[in-house]
Image: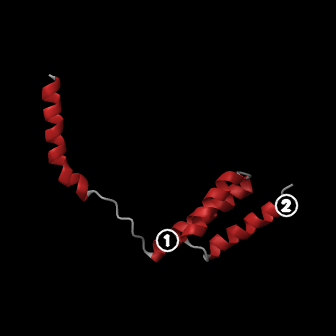
């Protein structure tokens, strides 16, 4: 029984291997996609800052700055983050 299951599993893997290769993830992004993603992360950061969730805010801000370091919304969120950090005890 176990021998049959191993053979069946091997057969399934051999059949599915070409299909799995075809499902590879495309990791290239257009500048517009990066800008949109950075803006979304910056908006999330601003919202988390406003609600006091500073750890989440910092994570989202870092992602926004990684994607678009000179983006208008990324810079706005970074300025807000600096203001919050300056006022912390």
Please give the name of the residue rendered at 27% of the width and 56% of the height, measured from the top-left corner. 23
**Quarter of the image where the C terminus is located:** bottom right
Label for residue 52? Answer: none
| Residue 65, quarter of the rendered image | bottom right
Quarter of the image with the N terminus in it: top left
- Look at 68% across and 67% down and name the residue there: 77
Secondary structure of residue under mark 1: helix
Q: What percent of the width, then of the height, locates residue 48?
A: 68, 55
Query: CA separation, marks 1 and 2?
Result: 31 Å
Residue with the mark numbered 2: 87
Quick check: 70 above or below 10?
A: below
Please give the name of the residue rendered at 62% of the width and 65% of the height, measured from the top-left corner.
Answer: 42
Q: Is residue 33 left or right of residue 1?
A: right
Work out whether mark 1 precedes mark 2 in sequence or the reverse, and give the earlier one. Answer: 1
Residue at image mark 1: 34
Q: In this view, does 67 lie to the left or right of 8?
A: right
- Name which residue lies at 59% across and 66% down: 64
x, y percent for residue 83: 79, 66
The one nearer the camera, 50 or 65, is 65
Q: Nearer the viewer, residue 43 or 4?
A: 4
């Amino acid at each position: 029984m176990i021998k049959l299951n191993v053979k069946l599993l091997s057969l399934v893997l051999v059949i599915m291997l070409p299909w799995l290769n075809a499902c590879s993830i495309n990791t290239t992004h257009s500048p517009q996609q990066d800008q949109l993603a950075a803006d979304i992360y910056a908006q999330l950061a601003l919202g988390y800052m406003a609600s006091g969730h500073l750890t989440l805010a910092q994570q989202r801000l870092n992602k926004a700055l990684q994607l678009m370091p000179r983006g208008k919304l990324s810079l706005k969120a970074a300025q807000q983050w600096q203001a919050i950090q300056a006022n912390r005890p």
